[in-house]
Image (cartoon, coloured by chain):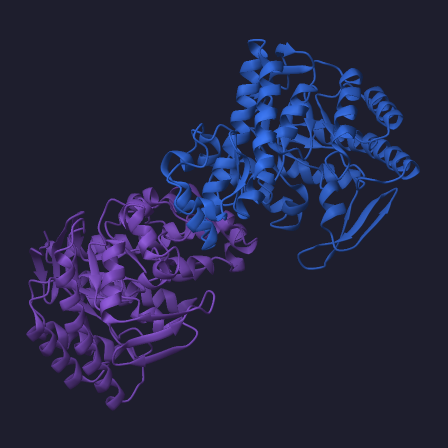
Chain colours: A purple, B blue
Amino acid sequence: MFDFPVQHTAGAARAGAFVTPHGDVPTPAFMPVGTAGAVKTLVMEEVAALGARMVLANTYHLYLRPGHELVRELGGLHRFMRWDGPILTDSGGFQVFSLAAIRDVHDDGVDFRSHIDGSLHKFTPESVMEVQRALGADVIMAFDECLPGGCDRATGEAAGVRTLAWLERCRKRFASLEGEAGLPEQTLFPVLQGNVFDDLRASHARRTLELGDWTGYGIGGLSVGEAKEDMWRTLELLDSELPRERPRYLMGVGYPDDLLEAIARGCDLFDCVAPTRNARHGTAWTSAEGQVNLKAARFRRDAGPIDAGCDCFACARYDRAYLRHLVVAREWLAMRLLSIHNLRFLVRLTEEARRRIGDSSFEAWRRDWLARYRNEGSKQ
Amino acid sequence: MFDFPVQHTAGAARAGAFVTPHGDVPTPAFMPVGTAGAVKTLVMEEVAALGARMVLANTYHLYLRPGHELVRELGGLHRFMRWDGPILTDSGGFQVFSLAAIRDVHDDGVDFRSHIDGSLHKFTPESVMEVQRALGADVIMAFDECLPGGCDRATGEAAGVRTLAWLERCRKRFASLEGEAGLPEQTLFPVLQGNVFDDLRASHARRTLELGDWTGYGIGGLSVGEAKEDMWRTLELLDSELPRERPRYLMGVGYPDDLLEAIARGCDLFDCVAPTRNARHGTAWTSAEGQVNLKAARFRRDAGPIDAGCDCFACARYDRAYLRHLVVAREWLAMRLLSIHNLRFLVRLTEEARRRIGDSSFEAWRRDWLARYRNEGSKQ
């Protein structure tokens, strides 16, 4: 049920189709984040209307609230959140390391306290498989140890060893659950770690490939505070290590320019809360002016749309003057309209990248696009 | 351009059509509140889709932010908030008395400090006409002195005298502005005060009628903490004082049962923030169970819609279990979906009241509806 035919390439960049039980996802593709089973402020009809084909939900949040067993009982995550397309759930690892109040990491797993009510919980590679099996997303992620950017080599190496041991346990538990009746068809992606140390990255990728012929690969441990050049070099290294006929999911990226740089380096799937989080702060992306904050006084009388080139509902219906008013007055509608715009901005970017990869104009277009976006953005 | 043909009656209840420059409003009608130029969390397409034909916006809020002159400059309130139907703006009086940080009421007007930034402002009957002329709503309201429920007779009488003097000044300023070029066609409603003192209510209504043949009448000073019987008695008294061929707008009502009681006593137009404010607290109205709070644990596994008899988007698409999860997780989408439901609930109620007035089944239906709603509501 899972496949990834690559249709066109342009250098390392690829245009493909990620085939899943809930439909095909043309790649490169950005997945809007529905943390707790909802893309903040939006209904899934809107998410579909802005062109997203696959969404992400957070295992950590859904495990804590409303609970994975309840989601299973109610028909699984697709039915629960009213989304018929493909879903990916993360492993909860990143949230345990970034959100949980207290955590104790050991070889067996992670003990942590809920950021909601302080209650004590434990994630192990096995339990995380069980939780994600109950949620029922199309793609589930292996449990990994996530380190912050800037950690030293020894720490990174130890985390890599642990992540590989956990991957093997995830694989076994995932396989043993296959036999259970009524489980949805799912696939498991490993998460590649190794921080920004080239030898760790290379050996981690090779060891991961030795453990199995995976349907796809999650690239973790990037966009966590490291320098941009470290991220690009790591992606280039992984491009040469990973099989070309499998999708690569760059976790937690991104911002428009990062997305484009990563597409150029062979990444296919992306997720990030930036579009909706920025929306809550009044920030919007534009192709001609870079990133703008609509609170700025210069938008007070601006009768134009957020982005003249954008076809989203917010740009089709509203002007900057009104949106600025909503942002300043802290009206919830502002977050909703800017979320639609920012998500559509990223989806359009992937759509155009895909077209450009198809007609061999990708490299020139990417350079021009980045120069314009960054140059204008820096003038604000 | 303004008219109010009454098509059917059932006792004091009336089914009519309020004719305005931006279209006809079948009555009775509930007007969703777009405080700062947006019905909280919703786009106006959704407000239209749930059957609302006329909306309200707050002069106080729009005067402070973004400013009435800016709204005028941007094409007026209809264009600003993307609503082609009729709009009513209140006078700002109620907000000055309930929201402003400090206020000093005198015969000339009210000095007050903004609840947003503490800046000093002054509303006079004349300035309030100018502000509402700039905003450009179809119906604008006279500036009145609003008292809290439970005030004594002497205070009520003095406020009534002042409100009548202000009404005369509003009328003059409104008329003098008629000559200015480019102003939209608008009409001015007086606000009837007199608290719950029958003689003050009667004399205030008579004095207001002596001042002019108004297009319609605002009924103020109710739903401010007085006993329900006082509200019903006051409405019955006003029904005998006011001309039958003019619409009556009961300000700040209401909750479903209050709406129905007021329709039975001859009121035609209503507004209230309860549908959207309750939504933010997880509260929904249902015809079979009265008012329910979706946080309740009994909805955890409830696969049914909020209200089986409801045709709103939230009821058509979502179950209580998911909505409960969104409410508990404080997802903004909960507020949006419950706002749609609660607003549709009130609009449906006015639609059914209108049908029942037309086919003479209003009184029996009203009694049954209220008994069921209140009885079930009290069981929760």
**Residue A371: which quarter of the image?**
bottom left
Residue A241, position in %: x, y? 9, 75
Residue B365: percent from the left, percent from the top?
58, 17
Can residue B138 be seen in the rendering of this structure?
Answer: no
- Choose between A239 and B109: the one closer to the eye: A239
Near-viewer residue (A79 or B166): A79
Which of A287 and B258 lies nearest the eye of the viewer?
A: B258
Name the side, left or right, on which B52 lies relative to A3. Answer: right
In the image, residue B239 lies at what x, y percent? 75, 18
Give the residue drawn at x 86%, y 43%. B108
Instruction: Classify residue B56 as left or right of residue B41.
Output: right
At 24% from the left and 82% from the top, the residue drawn is A159
Residue A83: x percent and y percent?
Answer: 28, 45
| Viewer-closest of A348 and B52 | B52
Residue A65's quadrant in the figure? bottom left
Q: Which residue lies furthest to the right in this view?
A: B154
Q: In which quarter of the image is the C terminus of chain A?
A: bottom left
* In the depicted structure, whether residue A128 falls above or below residue B179: below
Vertical arrangement, residue A276 with respect to residue A243, above or below: above
- Is residue A29 at least partly visible in the picture? yes
Looking at the image, residue A239 lies above or below residue A185: below
